[in-house]
Image (cartoon, rainbow, N blue to C red):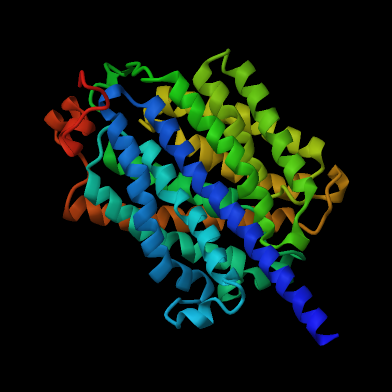
C-alpha cells in the first residue's frame, strides 16, 4: 500500500513539474512577441536593436533573478547540491523558471517605451537592477506574504490583495517603471515640433501583428499556468482570458477607428487587465473588464502622445501601467459575488495593493534609472540617434540596404 501511495505521489509531483514547465515555455515564447511587437512599431533603423534588447534583457534577467531576485521574493537560493535541488522531481527549479519568465517581462515592457534613443549597456544595467531588487520586492509582498503586508490587509479589510497572474505585480510594475524611464530619457529627436507631434510610422504592421498574436497565445500559459499545480487549474481562467482579449479587441477597433496599431494592442490591453481577477470573475465580467481596458489604452495613448507629449514609443505605460491598474481594481469589483464573481476579494484591499505596487515601481525606477542617468548617461548622441540604434550600437542594419 505504501508503494502505491508513493507511486501516486511521485506521479502527481512529476505531473505538476511538467505542467509548470509547459507554462514556463509558453511565457518564454511570449518574449518573441515582445520582440516582434517592438520590431514592427519602431523605424527600420532600430529593428536590430529591438531584437537584441529583448533577448539580452531576458538573459540578464535570468541571472539577476536567479542569484538575487528570487531570494528577495521567496527567501530561497539555489546553492545546494543538485541532488537536493531535484529532490521534488525538480518542481522547485521549474517553478523558478516559470516565475523568472514573469520577472523578465519587466525589461521587455520597458524596452518598448524607451526605444530608438536609448544607450544599450546603461539601460541593460538599470533593467537588471529593477529585476533584481524592485520587482521582487513587490512580488514577495503580493505573492509570498512578505513583511506582513497581506496579513495586515486581511485583518483590516477582510481579504488580502489579490493578483492571480500579475496585472499589478508584473504589468503594473513594469509599466510604471517604464514611464519613469521614458521621462528621464526624454523624447526622440524630431518627435515634437512647434508643440505638435510628428508621425513616426511603424516599420512593419505584419511584424507588429505577429508580435501581438504571439503574446496573445502565450498569455493563456501566463494566466492558466499561474495555478502552478494541476489540481489548481481552472477552465474559468482560460475562458475569462479569452473573453477579456475579445473585449479589448472590439473596443480598440471601434475607439481606435480601425487603426491596426490600436487593433493589435487592444487584445493585449484586455489581457493585462484580466490577469488579476481571471480566477474570480464571471466570463461576462471579464468581457467588460477587457472592453474597458481596450478603450482605456486607446484614449490614454492618444493623450500621452499628443496632449502630454510623452514619447512612450509602444505606449507601454497606457498598456501595462494603466490597464494593469484597472485590472487590479477591477478584480475588486467584478470578482465580487454581486457581479457574478466568486468573491473572496475586497475592493479596498485591491485599491491599496494597486497603489502600493505603483509606489514601489516609481520609487525604485527613479533610483535605478536616475542613478544610471547621473553616473553614465541614458541617451545616444544626436548623431547616433539620427543614424539609428542598429548601426550606432550593433554596426549592422536589418536589411542589406541599411
Residue extending farthest to the left is: 383
- Residue 77: x and y, percent? 46, 77
- What is the quadrant of the C terminus in the image? top left
Question: Considering depth in this image, is 339 or 274 the residue closer to the camera?
Answer: 274
Residue extending farthest to the bottom is: 2
- Residue 267: x and y, percent? 61, 31
In-image side of 153 versus 379 (left or right) = right
Considering only vertical position in the picture, is 257 above or below 399?
Answer: above
Considering only vertical position in the picture, is 60 above or below 380?
Answer: below
Identify the residue shown where x is 74% and y is 60%: 230
Identify the residue shown where x is 49% and y is 51%: 173
In-image side of 250 versus 106 (left or right) = right
Residue extending farthest to the top is: 257
Question: Considering depth in this image, is 203 or 362 the residue closer to the camera?
Answer: 203
In-image side of 70 versus 203 (left or right) = right
Q: Exactly how many numbered labels are in the figure?
A: 0
Determine which quarter of the picture holds residue 296.
top right
Q: Is residue 165 visible?
A: yes
Question: Considering depth in this image, is 394 or 81 the residue closer to the camera?
Answer: 81
- Residue 305: x and y, percent? 41, 26
Identify the residue shown where x is 34% and y is 60%: 129
Considering only vertical position in the picture, is 255 above or below 30?
Answer: above
- What is the quadrant of the N terminus in the image? bottom right
Q: Is residue 354 visible?
A: no
Identify the residue shown where x is 22% and y is 33%: 389
In-image side of 214 versus 240 (left or right) = left
- Residue 334: x and y, percent? 77, 44
Considering only vertical position in the picture, is 61 above or below 333?
Answer: below
Amino acid at each position: 500500500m505504501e508503494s502505491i501511495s508513493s507511486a501516486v505521489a511521485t506521479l502527481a509531483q512529476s505531473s505538476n513539474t511538467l505542467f509548470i514547465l509547459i507554462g514556463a515555455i509558453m511565457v518564454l515564447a511570449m518574449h518573441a512577441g515582445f520582440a516582434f511587437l517592438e520590431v514592427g512599431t519602431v523605424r527600420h533603423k532600430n529593428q536590430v536593436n529591438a531584437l537584441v534588447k529583448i533577448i539580452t534583457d531576458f538573459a540578464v534577467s535570468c541571472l539577476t533573478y536567479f542569484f538575487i531576485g528570487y531570494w528577495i521574493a521567496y527567501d530561497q537560493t539555489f546553492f545546494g547540491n543538485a541532488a537536493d535541488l531535484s529532490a521534488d522531481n525538480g518542481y522547485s527549479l521549474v517553478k523558478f523558471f516559470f516565475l523568472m519568465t514573469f520577472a523578465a517581462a519587466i525589461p521587455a515592457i520597458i524596452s518598448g517605451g524607451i526605444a530608438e534613443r536609448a544607450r544599450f549597456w546603461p539601460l541593460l544595467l538599470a533593467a537588471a537592477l529593477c529585476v533584481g531588487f524592485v520587482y521582487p520586492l513587490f512580488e514577495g509582498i503580493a505573492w509570498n506574504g512578505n513583511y506582513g503586508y497581506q496579513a495586515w490587509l486581511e485583518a483590516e479589510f477582510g481579504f488580502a490583495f489579490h493578483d492571480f497572474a500579475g496585472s499589478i505585480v508584473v504589468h503594473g510594475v513594469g509599466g510604471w517603471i517604464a514611464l519613469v524611464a521614458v521621462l528621464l530619457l526624454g523624447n526622440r529627436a524630431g518627435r515634437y515640433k512647434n508643440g505638435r507631434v510628428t508621425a513616426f510610422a511603424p516599420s512593419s504592421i505584419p511584424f507588429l501583428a505577429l508580435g501581438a498574436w504571439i503574446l496573445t497565445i502565450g498569455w493563456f500559459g501566463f494566466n492558466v499556468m499561474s495555478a502552478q499545480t494541476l489540481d489548481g487549474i481552472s477552465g474559468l481562467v482560460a475562458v475569462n482570458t479569452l473573453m477579456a482579449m475579445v473585449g479589448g479587441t472590439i473596443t480598440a477597433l471601434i475607439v481606435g477607428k480601425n487603426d491596426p496599431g490600436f487593433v493589435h494592442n487592444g487584445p493585449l490591453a484586455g489581457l493585462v487587465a484580466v490577469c488579476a481577477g481571471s480566477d474570480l470573475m464571471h466570463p461576462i465580467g471579464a468581457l467588460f473588464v477587457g472592453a474597458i481596458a481596450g478603450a482605456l489604452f486607446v484614449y490614454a495613448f492618444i493623450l500621452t502622445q499628443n496632449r502630454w507629449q510623452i514619447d512612450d514609443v509602444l505606449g507601454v505605460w497606457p498598456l501595462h501601467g494603466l490597464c494593469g491598474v484597472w485590472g487590479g481594481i477591477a478584480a475588486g469589483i467584478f470578482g465580487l459575488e454581486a457581479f457574478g464573481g466568486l468573491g473572496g476579494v475586497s475592493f479596498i484591499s485591491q485599491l491599496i495593493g494597486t497603489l502600493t505596487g505603483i509606489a514601489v515601481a516609481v520609487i525604485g525606477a527613479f533610483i535605478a534609472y536616475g542613478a544610471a542617468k547621473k553616473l553614465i548617461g541614458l541617451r545616444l548622441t544626436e548623431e547616433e540617434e539620427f543614424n539609428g540604434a542598429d548601426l550606432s550600437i550593433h554596426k549592422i542594419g536589418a536589411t542589406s540596404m541599411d
